[in-house]
């Protein structure tokens, strides 16, 4: 009996966690589950984003289904400068001493087409385009564009399988 009570309480608590929505346009028929963070996102009608997703700088089409724990976007890191530390990026130098020598753009834009299904625990790199009707399998890492109506699983495009 105690196990059932704990189970139901955990389900209730998962549903009441807050979402972080910054500069978003979400169609009134779409849904974002609790624990998800969306920044600079446009979301089409009848789309659904699962629990604990992080989505940055992305346009999402209509009728899309996203699983839980998906990460889309994020800032790239420089690997050919003196350091990978963000203090060397002009728009990220938050210290009193100025180390920044180079302009560095954090902006990259990701585009997800209509009727796309993205399963749980998927990572999609900034700047990728996922075409209409595409399916991305659970645990995939997407670093290149996915064409319309393609089904992919794995780490794209290196050791993945187009199904």
Image (tube, rainbow, N blue to C red):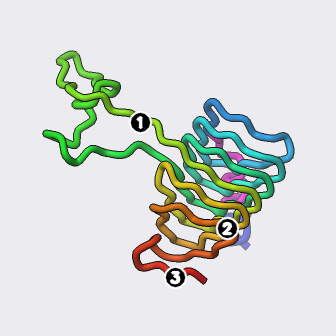
Mark 2 surroundings within 10 Å by alpha-carbon count, few (fewer than 14), some (14 through 19), many (20 or more) = many
- Pick the residue in front: 17 or 10: 17
Q: Position of residue 54 (x, y in %)?
A: 55, 49
- Circle 3 residue: 161
Highlighted magenta segment, given as a residue range? 8-19
Cα separation, mark 1 vs mark 3, equals 31 Å
- Circle 1 residue: 106
- Image quadrant in which you'd find residue 7: bottom right
Quarter of the picture containing the N terminus is bottom right
First in sequence, mark 2 or 3: give its number: 2
First in sequence, mark 1 or 2: give its number: 1
- Circle 2 residue: 134
SS under mark 2: loop
Cα separation, mark 1 vs mark 2, equals 27 Å
Q: Is residue 77 magenta?
A: no
For the stretch drawn in magenta, the main secondary structure is helix
Cα separation, mark 2 vs mark 3, equals 14 Å
Q: Position of residue 15 (x, y in %)?
A: 71, 52
Mark 3 surroundings within 10 Å by alpha-carbon count, few (fewer than 14), some (14 through 19), many (20 or more) = few
């Amino acid at each position: 009996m105690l196990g059932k009570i704990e189970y139901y309480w955990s389900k209730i608590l998962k549903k009441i966690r807050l979402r972080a929505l910054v500069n978003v346009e979400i169609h009134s028929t779409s849904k974002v589950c609790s624990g998800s963070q969306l920044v600079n996102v446009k979301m089409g009608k009848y789309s659904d984003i699962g629990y604990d997703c992080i989505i940055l700088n992305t346009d999402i089409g209509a009728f899309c289904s996203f699983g839980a724990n998906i990460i889309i976007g994020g800032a790239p890191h420089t690997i050919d400068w003196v350091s990978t530390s963000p203090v060397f990026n002009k728009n990220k130098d938050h210290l009193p001493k100025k180390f920044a020598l180079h302009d560095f753009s954090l902006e990259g834009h990701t585009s997800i087409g209509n009727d796309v299904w993205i399963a749980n625990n998927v990572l999609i790199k900034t700047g990728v385009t996922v075409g209409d009707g595409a399916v991305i399998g659970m645990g995939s890492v997407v670093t290149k564009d996915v064409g319309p109506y393609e089904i992919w699983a794995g780490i794209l495009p290196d050791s993945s399988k187009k199904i």
